[in-house]
Amino acid sequence: MCLFCKIVNKEIPSNIILEDEEFLAFHDINPKAPLHILAIPKIHVDSFNEADGDLMGKMSTFIQRIASEVDIDKSGYRVITNVGKNGGQEVQHLHFHVLGGAKLHWGHFSDADPQGHF
Ligand code: 5GP
Ligand code: ZN
């Protein structure tokens, strides 16, 4: 069973913010912003590559609920999902990073030439 499935099953403790039948939100153990929350489906989905429209629709609503729950819906926030090796995905269970609580930086995603692909 993967790490986040164990968190869903409460085999590994987490600091839960919001939970319903299908989704769970908890604080990231290694926060990269004053608020760094992970939102996951309770069912195991490897990554965004396998997330269908129905799941993503419900996921969106759940993330919006998180933002208002922790009061960052008006001040703003960022939603990120890392996919695969180049995306930097370390846990192979679909998760969305919800980052906020301060003005976030933007830029420098890769040491490769940003113009190099075209
Ligand atoms: P990824 O790099 O896969 O997009 O993100 C995985 C995230 O999971 C990282 O931000 C990491 O800090 C977080 N993480 C890893 N293990 C645990 C854990 O046991 N508990 C919690 N709450 N977060 C974790
Ligand atoms: Zn899993």
Image (spheres, helix red, strand yellow):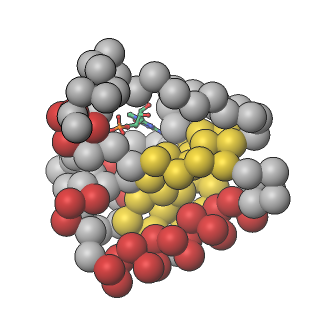
| In this picture, residue 107 sits left or right of residue 55 | right
Residue that extends furthest to the bottom in the rendered view of this protein:
54
Does the rendering let one see residue 90?
no
Where is residue 76 drawn, in percent x and y? 73, 51
Residue displayed at 39% across by 43% down:
12
Residue displayed at 41% across by 59% down:
40
| In this picture, residue 9 sits left or right of residue 60 | left
Where is residue 20 drawn, in percent x and y? 52, 74
Query: Along the line of sight, which residue is nearer the eye, 2 or 34?
Result: 34
User: Looking at the image, in which quadrant does ligand 1 appear?
Assistant: top left
Residue displayed at 63% across by 28% down:
105
Residue that extends furthest to the top in the rendered view of this protein:
111
Residue displayed at 36% across by 58% down:
9
Where is residue 35 drawn, in percent x and y? 67, 39
The correct choice, above or below, for 31 with respect to 47 in the image is above
Does the rendering let one see residue 78?
yes
Where is residue 83 drawn, in percent x and y? 26, 46
Query: Along the line of sight, which residue is nearer the eye, 106 or 77?
Result: 106
Query: Along the line of sight, which residue is nearer the eye, 12 or 85?
Result: 85
